[in-house]
Structures are given as C-alpha cells and as structure tokens.
C-alpha cells in the first residue's frame, strides 16, 4: 500500500471507535483528512455525532462534506479526539504541529476523555526529535523569544537551528494569529524537561510536544494495522 492508503486504513480502524451520540474532536493534517472523509460517509448513512475541529482547515472540510460541527464554547467536554501525529515516541509521547494547528489541537485533546492517534508506521520513533519541534510563539518580541528558547534548550544539552516557518515568502500565521518556530534539536531524551523549560518562556504560546494526552495509536504498515496503548 502507498502512504495515502496506509493513512486511510488507519483512519478506518479509528472510525470503529466512534459511536452514535459522541462529541468528537477532529484533528488536522493529511491523515486526519482521510478520517473526516470516512466519517462523512457514516454521517450520511445516519451516524449521529457532533465534531469540534482543531483548525479552520478541518472545519472547512467538515462543512463541505456535511459533518455537523460545534465549538469548544458550546461543547467544552469531548468524548474522543482523533488526530494524526508527526512523530510517535515511547509511552505515546508525540510531536505534532507540522500542519500549524498545534495550539488548538492540544486544547481539544486536553478537553477530551480519550485521544486516539492515527498514523503510518514511519511515524514511530525510539526517541522524539527527528521531526523538527514546532513552537508557537507570540509575534511580539519574536527575536527575544527565539534567544530564550535557544538558551533553554542549551541548558538541556539540545542544540540546533530555530527556523521561522514561512509560506509564500511571508511568515506563516496560525489560526490563533501567532508565528511558529521549527526547532531542529535532534533527539530529545527528556521531553518533560523541555516542555517545562519552553512553557516558562513568556513568548512561547505552546509547543508541539504532546505528553500524556494520547491513550492509543493506530499505526498502519505494509503488514497490517497495529494498535498501541498508553500505559496507565
């Protein structure tokens, strides 16, 4: 199977966890989009759910395909979130944010009783960090925040370039109106320490380390589907 077919198969298994009446967080990215398409088919045949999208991009696709939507203001507690990931590490720690929606993705995941991640096997890693870590930052004081991130990383033995994410020659702006710095630190041995250090920087809005949020990962490979559960 090609990469897209693997995503579809993972999304299909994830859909089996969705039941009638659920309040559902709906993720962002290419894998999540395959889930939305399959979900829309079920809605069209009578499945009754309400979705809370993690991005304007996901919201637009849901509306186009007829998936009923709510907001976290209207539906502040969710039963399940299904989303993709850029990397899946030990204990289902994740790097997310390659699509630029990490802040809303984390808010929605935290509001959910469960989070299921869908991905192809290439996303499984022994240590997070091969994929650059997205860090959402306030536009004000960007350079000062960048310097502070570099210093915080250095105290943890992490080094590497911080790159302002660009699109069409201008800085990428998140749905929340912020910029993203992509941190190429390489291997991150202590994700909790880095998470704490980044959260201590005033200009950091959020980062793409998802720790303790995912309850399961549905991973598709050439030899089939594997479901990995978080230790509780």
Image (cartoon, helix red, strand yellow):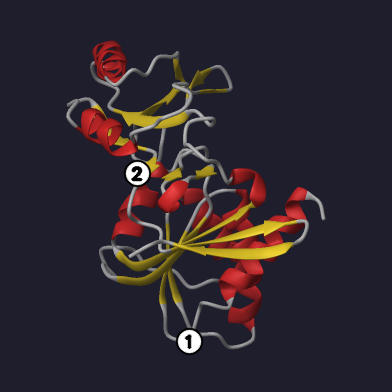
Give the crowd class for mark 2: few <14, some 14-19, many >=20 residues within 10 Å: many
Looking at the picture, does residue 8 appear above or below residue 176?
A: below
State whether residue 151 appears in this view: yes
Give the crowd class for mark 1: few <14, some 14-19, many >=20 residues within 10 Å: few
Residue 90 location in percent, x, y?
A: 45, 48
Residue 183 location in percent, x, y?
A: 43, 23
* Nearer the observer, 154 or 17: 154
* Nearer the observer, 12 or 123: 123
Looking at the picture, does residue 12 appear above or below residue 148?
A: below
Residue 74 location in percent, x, y?
A: 27, 69
* Nearer the observer, 179 or 195: 195
Question: Image point 26% across, 67% down: which residue?
Answer: 76
> Residue at label 2?
103
Tell me the SS state at disc 2.
helix
Question: Image point 55% across, 85% down: which residue?
Answer: 47
> Residue at label 1?
20
Residue 181 location in percent, x, y?
A: 40, 23
The residues tagged by marks 2 and 1 sit, at their Cα atoms, a distance apart of 28 Å
Residue 167 lies in quadrant: top right
């Amino acid at each position: 199977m090609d990469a897209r077919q693997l995503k579809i198969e993972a999304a299909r298994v994830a859909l089996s966890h969705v039941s009638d009446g659920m309040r559902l967080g709906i993720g962002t990215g290419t894998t999540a989009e395959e889930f939305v398409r399959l979900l829309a088919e079920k809605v069209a045949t009578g499945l009754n759910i309400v979705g809370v999208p993690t991005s304007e991009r996901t919201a637009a696709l849901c509306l186009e395909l007829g998936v009923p939507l709510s907001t976290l203001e209207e539906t502040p507690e969710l039963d399940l979130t299904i989303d993709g990931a850029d990397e899946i590490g030990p204990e289902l720690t994740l790097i997310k944010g390659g699509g630029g929606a990490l802040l809303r993705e984390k808010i929605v995941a935290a509001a959910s009783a469960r989070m299921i991640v869908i991905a192809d096997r290439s996303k499984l890693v022994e240590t997070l960090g091969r994929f650059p870590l997205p860090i959402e930052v306030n536009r004000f004081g960007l350079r000062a925040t960048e310097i502070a991130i570099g210093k915080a990383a250095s105290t943890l033995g992490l080094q590497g370039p911080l790159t302002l994410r660009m699109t069409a020659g201008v800085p990428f702006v998140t749905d929340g109106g912020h910029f993203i710095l992509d941190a190429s630190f390489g291997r991150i041995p202590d994700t909790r320490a880095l998470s704490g250090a980044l959260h201590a920087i005033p200009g950091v809005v959020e980062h793409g380390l998802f720790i303790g949020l995912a309850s399961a990962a549905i991973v598709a490979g050439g030899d089939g589907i594997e479901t990995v559960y978080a230790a509780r």
